[in-house]
Amino acid sequence: MSRPRQLGLAVLLGTASFVAQAEDAWVAEARQLATSVPPKLLAVLNREIEQGGAVQAIGACQIQAPEMARQASAASGWTVRRVSLRERNPKARPDAWEQAALEDFDRRVAAGEVPMTLEKAERVDVAGVPTLRYVRALAVGPVCVQCHGDTAQMDAGVKAKLAALYPHDRATGYAVGQIRGVITLSKPAP
Ligand code: HEC
């Protein structure tokens, strides 16, 4: 009696560990992508700010960021975007899953966790389609506050250009160490 049951358990455990391994592989892949794109954008931002100042660099965040996301998407099969609880571009609004992750990340940062390390990976159903989803926090660093910081301290030219481009901008008032948003990846599960 006990033998077949043990065998059954072994098969079950074997399957479970196989699934865990398969999930680790996609999570590692998503993490790799999510940590490789932001430093590239930061390099462009720094270069633009150095060469032409923050007003000129607005174009880097406006045009190059979505372009980098598109390229990363095309090269990897993941859909890559950026979203925020207080978005600048109206297209950057989170869906319910992303919003829950963002709110959780904000709570954890308030409790002392380091923003750079915050991530969430989950296999979820999106309108009946099994989907792999991954988000990783984008922290506010010193360079970011030039365009996302306290408006009272912002360069007048930056303020004017942001107001012209984004009349419904909600992405100001951030301080270094907060979470500006997440990079969000998804693709249909295999
Ligand atoms: C030179 C100005 C500038 C700087 C510096 C800057 N940003 Fe932005 N940021 C923008 C603009 C403009 C947008 C809107 C882009 C668009 O239209 O998609 C934006 C959008 C974003 C978004 C997408 C969500 C949203 O609100 O639309 C995130 C996330 C973001 N920035 C994070 C950062 C982080 C993190 C830093 C620092 C490493 C940073 N930004 C530095 C100008 C800037």
Image (cartoon, helix red, strand yellow):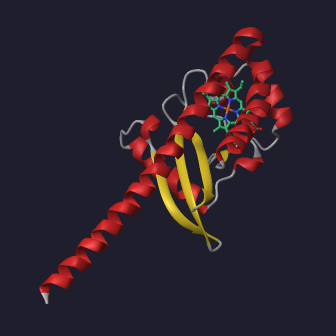
Q: What residue is shown at x 60% (from left), y 62% (from top)?
A: 96
Residue 109 to residue 60: above or below:
below
Q: In x, y percent, where is residue 52?
A: 78, 11
Q: What residue is shown at x 52% (from left), y 44% (from top)?
A: 29
Q: Residue furthest top?
A: 51
Q: What residue is shown at x 43% (from left), y 38% (from top)?
A: 117
Q: Residue furthest left?
A: 2
Pick the residue in front: 142 or 66: 66
Q: What residue is shown at x 86% (from left), y 33% (from top)?
A: 164
Pick the residue in front: 42 or 166: 42
Q: In x, y percent, where is residue 80?
A: 66, 46
- Report whether residue 172 is seen: yes
Q: Please identify the quadrant where the C terminus is shown.
A: bottom right
Q: In x, y percent, where is residue 12?
A: 30, 73
Q: Please identify the quadrant where the N terminus is shown.
A: bottom left
Q: Quadrant of ligand 1?
A: top right
Position of residue 64 in the picture relative to residue 119 (left or right): right
